[in-house]
Image (cartoon, coloured by chain):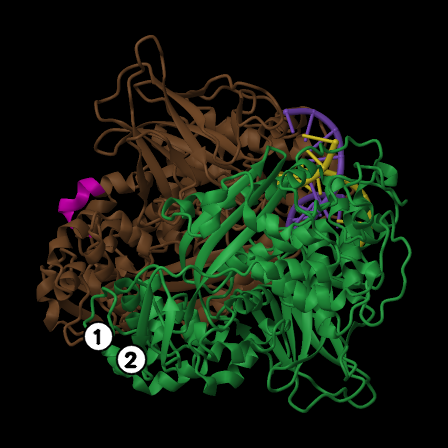
Chain colours: A brown, B green, C yellow, D purple
Amino acid sequence: MIQILHMFLQEHIYGTMADPDSLISQDTFSELLAQLNDVTENGNFTQVNDTTEFEFGGNEVKTTFQMEKYIISGTGQEVLGIPTSQQQQLQQQQLLQQQIQVLPDSATAAASTSPSPYTQMIGTQATSMPSNTEYPGQYGFEVCFGKQQKETKSTTWTYSESLKKLFANLASLCPIKFRCSKSPPPGSVIRALPIYMQPEHIQEPVSRCPNHITKEDPNRDHKSHLIRCENPNTVYYTDQLTNRESLTIPFEEPQAGSDTSVSLFQFMCYSSCVGGLNRRPIQIIFTLETPMGHVIARRVCEVRICACPGRDRKAEEDGATPGNKKSNKKSKNVRVNQVVTTVGPPAKKRKLEDEEVFTLHVRGRENYEVLLKLRDSLELASKVPQPEVEKHNRDYDEINRRMTMNSQLSIPSSSQQGLSTPTPINQVLDRPPSLGLDKLPSLPGLSNLPSIPSFGMSQFFDQIDGKLDAQPAKITEDVHRIKIEPEVTETNEVSSSQSPSTSTNQQSPPITSTQPIDTVEMWLKNIELPAYIDMFKTRGYNFMYQLEDMQQQDLDKLKIGEGHRSKIWRALVEYKNTHDIKGSQTQAQGLSNSSNASTVTIPSQSSGYCPGFYEVTRYTFKHTISLRKDEHNYCARMEVTEEDEQGNVKPKGAKMDT
Amino acid sequence: MIQILHMFLQEHIYGTMADPDSLISQDTFSELLAQLNDVTENGNFTQVNDTTEFEFGGNEVKTTFQMEKYIISGTGQEVLGIPTSQQQQLQQQQLLQQQIQVLPDSATAAASTSPSPYTQMIGTQATSMPSNTEYPGQYGFEVCFGKQQKETKSTTWTYSESLKKLFANLASLCPIKFRCSKSPPPGSVIRALPIYMQPEHIQEPVSRCPNHITKEDPNRDHKSHLIRCENPNTVYYTDQLTNRESLTIPFEEPQAGSDTSVSLFQFMCYSSCVGGLNRRPIQIIFTLETPMGHVIARRVCEVRICACPGRDRKAEEDGATPGNKKSNKKSKNVRVNQVVTTVGPPAKKRKLEDEEVFTLHVRGRENYEVLLKLRDSLELASKVPQPEVEKHNRDYDEINRRMTMNSQLSIPSSSQQGLSTPTPINQVLDRPPSLGLDKLPSLPGLSNLPSIPSFGMSQFFDQIDGKLDAQPAKITEDVHRIKIEPEVTETNEVSSSQSPSTSTNQQSPPITSTQPIDTVEMWLKNIELPAYIDMFKTRGYNFMYQLEDMQQQDLDKLKIGEGHRSKIWRALVEYKNTHDIKGSQTQAQGLSNSSNASTVTIPSQSSGYCPGFYEVTRYTFKHTISLRKDEHNYCARMEVTEEDEQGNVKPKGAKMDT
DNA sequence: CAGGCATGCCTG
DNA sequence: CAGGCATGCCTG
Ligand SMILES: [Zn+2]
Ligand SMILES: [Zn+2]
């Protein structure tokens, strides 16, 4: 974790925040850490070997230092087990995940024997958070909406220019116009992908609610897709890795006399659908992509699917201007959206409502996008309601408890240090940092609120006698000082076979068959339907575990005749019943069969070794603080702090700027 | 249909309405007919051979006379194919269906070669409409609710004595108390079954919504059950025929010092759950049953599952008294409930709100219950919103269209009569009847509402020059005059084998296997798991088509080891894929294998003969009238009409009694 | 936990 | 289709 942070800081924060006016504050720093937590929750690792945990502080302020070990894969590609010949199609499928190429060298690193597995984790995070940055690109890609017919309360759809938001009725046909100032490469497509706008949900794929899926015509394809398009060339995608559902339509040059080409879109759930969108605002990300799957432009549009688009549009437009409660809530979304659209040289900004805005200059689009996303996440994360935060914490406590149960301390120094003075933290935090929590300013209208207790934080950092220079450069150096070595308790040298069909002499997991059938190829041969091997491979299904979540309707989408299809389905049901394909042993086994690594030496603690996989020790620095919401709001703001100048933490409420 | 009506009238209306003050009015009469429509929508028949239809009237008033032919089974038991040795368990499972033993001789009739198949249809109707009549029985069974802890808006549950309605929060633990004034037979159980109160939904089983089912812990049993009980001896049931879900708990004598025994119930969906209850009010029917499954007492309680029980209770209690719109709606439910609870010698009643109440004396509980149900249905049917009615009609038009497509007129007289003077109706309706629609009284507060057009009705009955004596005795005689003979176009003499395993020499439907596997027994032998034959039989699964809707979780409930269970499941999936077990041929074949009928001569029009099945011609007299809601409310009331005295129809609005 | 919003849907 | 209810849920 710290190493992730290190790389993160090195690559982005250090590299982009050289402007001394734009120092990252400690609270933002700690929020960065919290953000990265999510990496492990959607990551690629298959095994947790070890966990240890330190905990400091009391009820209100709690800091944990936790170390976990995972087996993760070297690259995303290898986790999927897709050979390089499939790369192109993979690009098509994974384009959503390449949008933040945080560390473009991760692919090469994976081929070496000592790659940095953390790079992948960041890649994974990018995977679950598609970029929503507006980016007209060199072809001047634009999305626009015509004037709707009527402005009644229950019009089928209406677009608010001021809100940059589309309001549409359930399943209504909504004409969306596309245009490029310059013709994109022939064969370019427009992809429409829905995402949740709120950071606490952004990683969750957007799908229809069970009610609507269940009641959908069973013969229909893509029942679970929220977005549909009437365009006859629409292609529906479901990302195998993230389960995100999207569609593409060909980019078409406007007809003669028109400057846009129009397609009719439908949204198949209400934004309020319980068990689905559940009142969470969504955006549609329209990406213009080359035939090879490269994103060359991106446009974003918030969408609300509701029963009364006219009414709700009016309410939001009205509510955004008056200074009442409603506006508070509404303006959040609006601001998020506006923020996303401020691409290009950012101009100096003045106050927006009661929040002062600072300017951050960023060099390079790539870094800019990363920071943009993080900025949004930081700001929005503060809006997570307290119960949600507490649940998150409880979940973590539970996870920690479980993981600690079957593990011992495995970092050499830690067990000696005991709970009070953990060396790694001590090394990183050379200076008592301000997490921004001890100097909570009282906002204008909030000064009468009870202030949070501040015990714990300063004491804690005093206690470990650390010192953290808020200069990013310094942080990086400090981080460099602790080089985390994955602990090696056992070394296995294995040779994986190149062909899946010759992998019988490997140590098999205890499954019923004498010859383990891990690959789709073997399985299809086994059920005497080898003719479909290519079809499965083309879709990226190489290993049986990839079929684990395949449903009958997924199978129906393949162009297989009824008889064979049902045979395949039955065989799959049988396979699932007899194989625990979720088991890490089987999965690792299956994966190892296709990795191109020939002979690697990898550290391993359990018997579950596998080439192409690397053991990783994750260090989690978790700082949990119970805050009242209003204060939380404020703390999470990305602001310039001054504790570096002053050398110590200001008392809370001392620094105010509004 | 007319014969059904005949029997209905003979058995119940005639038998119980001898009091000349309690004549059935023509609108009630026609509503009776409409009610019986439902028989065919959930019935047991497997084949429709023939349909013909007459239609009269214009847009607002439409009368259709439709004749359809079905193959239905002689008895419900035989449709299920359950041998008599299973009777006892069947009773347990079907107790919900026996509550209206309209014609208790139907079981014996089935054994003869010329049973009246119509009896079964009424039985079927009872199946889908469990009785909700309060019936303390000889043991004085009572259900009651303690005082809830608090009366706040969001209290977990609250019971309104005035509304006789329980308001409960989702999944809250709701203590329900049971008591008997006299100890019931040892081993008696209390069953809780939810039903929709509205007649248009009463036949739909009450289950949880897809959202809640989907999000339920996958390891949990009975995910789809709306009602749960914390009682450790709770047994959950899903009726194989109706899919109704219920549970039973043992009846327990109160602990010392207490006069009731308490169990904690939970309701697992909101009454408002989309895709589930969907804002439809429900009742819980508590039946006290002997160990043999005989219902010996019944109590009914309306339940509303909502987020704010306190608020909603208050709103309903308040809304029930003032005379505003709200009260109009609320009072319906209240009235329905109160109506149901008026068991015992009915006392003369005066006005209830703005509706006059008449008294009907009924001899015998059985008849009383039938009439009670019909009365409720009649009154409630009027509350079906107009779009629903229109949809119903459209559905029927579609059904009729489909059925007419592959059929010719088969009733001898009908094709000669043409569309204007259908003989059967003419014979039944010897006298111009008043359907109560031409003499709509204007209710006190409604006199300023536009009155419905009355054209069509009187003219129609004048035209056919009929004459209907409102004396039930006379009706019965009239009905007797038309004896409907099922048309015999072909006669097949078949002999069914006694044992399913020796049925190989029968003419097989075109299924893939050379030896058709229709019975669970054969199938289990075939997949080499004959050990489970008894287990399946015990649960009433005798034929493969009965397993058609079995899901993996159903299978999981059987006490079968993991290995065998998954083998059975896979085999079942395979079976379903290779057999069209829904096909009537297969089903009929499967059924015929177990019927005890030896050699019967049955009329048949298609090749789908089968012993134990009888061809039935159904005559549907459907009279559709478009009404404004307020008037509709009134029309459907069971009232005493006087047109028999006056000899013709009164002009609308001429008769008013408030 | 009371007040009140949010939002699908019903009514006229 | 506008007005307004119904009802889960959010806010203070
Ligand atoms: Zn939905
Ligand atoms: Zn539900």
Q: Nearer the viewer, residue B618 or A420?
A: B618
Q: Is residue A14 magenta?
A: no
Instruction: Say whether marks 2 and 1 touch (CB < 8 Å).
Output: yes
Q: Is residue A302 visible?
A: yes
Q: Which residue is mark 1?
A: B515
**Residue A603 vertical position relative to residue A37 in the rendered view, above or below:** below
In the picture, measured across the screen, residue B264 lies left or right of residue A407, that is right
Pointers 2 and 1 within a single chain = yes
Q: Quadrant of the N terminus of chain B?
A: bottom right
In the picture, measured across the screen, residue B345 lies left or right of residue B175, that is right
Q: Quick one: label 2 or label 1, which is nearer the N terminus?
A: 1
- The range drawn in magenta is A82-89
Which residue sits at x=32%, y=59%?
Answer: B606
User: Hey, which residue is sitting farthest top in the picture?
Assistant: A257
Image quadrant assignment for residue A89:
top left
Magenta region, main secondary structure: helix
In the picture, measured across the screen, residue B593 lies left or right of residue B98, that is left
Which residue sits at x=60%, y=72%?
Answer: B96
**Residue A68 vertical position relative to residue B648 in the rendered view, above or below:** below
Q: Which residue is mark 2?
A: B522
Amino acid type for the residue under numbered disc 1: Gln
Which class describes the residues within 10 Å of circle 1: few (<14), some (14-19), or many (20+)? some
Image quadrant assignment for residue B126:
bottom right
Which residue sits at x=47%, y=73%?
Answer: B114
